[in-house]
Every structure is written in structure tokens, then in C-alpha cells.
Image (tube, grey):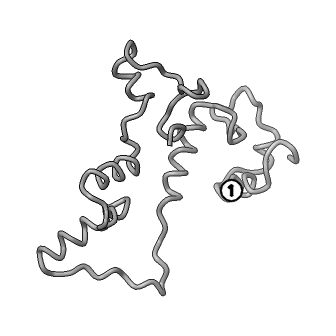
Amino acid sequence: MNGRIGRLALRILLEAGVSKENLVNKDIRTVKHKIVWAPGHAGIAGNLKADGIARGYTLFRAPEETEEPTRVPREYSAILNYYKGSRKRYPPPHKSLNTEDAVTWRQLQAGSYTNLHTLNKMHPTLYADTCPWCQDKPTLYHIT
């Protein structure tokens, strides 16, 4: 069996009630299902979907026993502020910035600041999709 099936897979099959003799002596043409090992980046559609689902579960974790749960306030305004604050991705702009600069800073943080690349997508005849200095693609990251 070495080289055909991994030891862990063999143990799982044996615990499920499949005998070793049946695995060895079984005619491969009568088997309706096969277990196929595929490398992680082989590009097999089903494997990619399963990998995506498995990776989705890695973002969740059980809370540690020592970790105390976050206390949620009881007043409506405090509850609203709590949930509003937990959704914020970026801190608010500095108080010393005027309104125009604060809006510009927020657009830079969010990646929605107007740049040549997005202007070219909206008006391809008016704006070139090349950097005026180096002829590269003028994305927001490139320009800033």
C-alpha cells in the first residue's frame, strides 16, 4: 500500500470498516468512487472551490477561555456608537484638517481619490492611461 495511499487516509478507511484485503484485491474497474490527491495549486476546479471554502473557515476562531467577552452597552445611543465604531475601517481624519483636506484624506484612505487611471476608464478620449513622467499605468498607488 505504500506509495498508493497515505497512512492517515488508510487509517481513516480502516476505521470506516473497509478491510485491507478489499483495498488491495479490489478490481479497480468495479470501484465507483476514487480518492484523488491533488496538490494545492494544481488548478483543479473542485479543488479550488474546496480550498476557498476551507480558507473561509480559517478566518473564524473560537474565543480563548481567558478572553473576556466585550461588554455591549444598554443605552440606545451607546449601542449605536458601539456598532458604528466597530464597522469603521479607518480612524477619523485629524481635527486640524479643514473639511476639504479631510475629504481628500478619506478618499486617499478608501482608494477612491480621482486619478488618471480612473479618469481614463470614464473618459478614454480625454485622459491617457499612461503616467506623464514614466509611461507606466497611473494607478492611485503609482501616482501617490
Residue 111 % position (x, y):
41, 44
Residue at 77% across / 36% down in the picture? 26
Residue 52 % position (x, y):
53, 44
Foreground residue among 41 and 114:
114
Disc 1 is placed on an element classified as helix
The quarter of the picture where residue 120 lies is top left
Residue 92 % position (x, y):
32, 63
Q: Name the side, left or right, on which 16 lies relative to 22.
A: left
The quarter of the picture where residue 40 lies is top right
Q: Name the side, left or right, on which 95 lies relative to 45.
A: left
Residue at 49% across / 52% down in the picture? 56
Please, what is the three-letter code of the amino acid marked with disc 1? Ile
Q: Is residue 3 above or below residue 96?
A: above
Q: How many marks?
A: 1
Residue at 24% across / 65% down in the picture? 84
Q: Is residue 139 above or below residue 69?
A: above
Residue at 26% across / 50% down in the picture? 100
Residue 65 % position (x, y):
48, 84
> In the rendered image, which residue does mark 1 sit on?
12
Q: Name the side, left or right, on which 128 lies relative to 29.
A: left
Q: Name the side, left or right, on which 109 lies relative to 92.
A: right
The extreme right residue here reads: 2
Foreground residue among 71 and 113:
113
Foreground residue among 129 and 85:
129
Q: Is residue 142 above or below residue 61?
A: above
